[in-house]
Image (tube, helix red, strand yellow):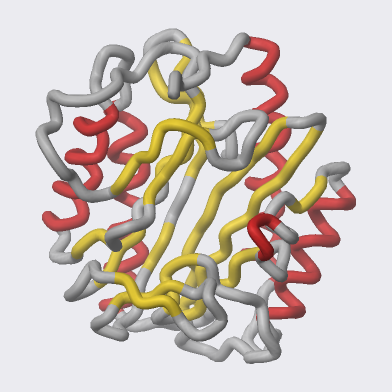
Amino acid sequence: MAIPLRKPGEITKLQKAGEIVGKTLQYLQDTIKPGMTLKEIDEMGEAYVRDLGAIPSFKGLYGFPGSVCTSLNEVCIHGVPTDQAIQEGDILGLDIGTKLDGYYGDAAITMPIGEISEKDKALIDCSRGALYHAIDLIRPGMRFKELTKILETYIRGEGFVPLRDYCGHGIGTKPHDEPNIPNYLEGKPNQGPKIKNGMVFCLEPMVCQESGHPLLLEDKWSVLSEDNLRTSHYEHQVAVVDGKAQILTAV
């Protein structure tokens, strides 16, 4: 399947959807306090997205029950909002999608709840650092597998490992589109499709401590590492414009 090339007007629409994601993530970071439940956080995120005029695109997507993926501590991605309360020292992943005028936005952060351990700080720094490092290096003509290698090299260089079987993705008039962008390399980096101006996609480093092999919890959504240690996840949606990547989900 061909990777769509978006016209400037389409990228503007994707940026508007993305800005709402960024604003919502910032609002939640500023508002979340120990003692809140994951369901309360989900409800706050949904209400904020709707107040800004967008639809929370994750709600009901493939059957997901919430609007915000709330991934607590060992859960890396797709955490289901429950009545569990967050506590001082936790780390919480928040992944949000929006739909606005037929176009999608998608981004994620992992945030500390109060004071956290140095190990957890390093874990969060790794996923965030890998994301921004890779975005800075995106250029037309490089292959997506080169981008994957950049992400994996950064993660392993910080002493961590990427989660397997899950990946970044294209985005546009569908929440998930071509191409898939893993955080670990299979094959050679000089293979596969090349990045071009007009492409829009999400990079999302998913970082584990000892094992990248995923386990799916009984809720059939929450994904963690088989090592059962804490994880971290960051994501931005970018458009390749005039030879470099422009972040569409920044505040």
User: Position of 149 compared to 108: left or right?
Assistant: left
Q: Nearer the viewer, residue 11 or 186?
A: 186
Quadrant housing residue 34: bottom right
* Image: 249 above or below 130: above
Q: Is residue 99 above or below residue 57?
A: above
What is the quadrant of the N terminus in the image?
A: top left
Q: Is residue 64 above or below residue 5?
A: below
Please state the horizontal and vertical placement of residue 14, each as a whole percent of the image.
66, 28
Residue at 14% in and 31% down: 189
In the displayed structure, would residue 51 be above or below residue 100?
Answer: below
- Closest to the observer, 163 or 72: 163
Residue occupying image coordinates x 34% and y 79%: 230
- Residue 173 spot, x, y in % from top left: 67, 30
Picture quarter containing residue 141?
top left
| Residue closer to the observer: 113 or 70 | 70
Find the residue positioned furthest to the front: 1
> Image point 32% across, 58% down: which residue?
165
- Dividing the picture into quadrants, the one containing residue 69 is bottom right
Tell me what residue is drawn at x 86 percent, y 52 percent.
50
Q: Position of residue 212 (x, y in %)?
A: 23, 67
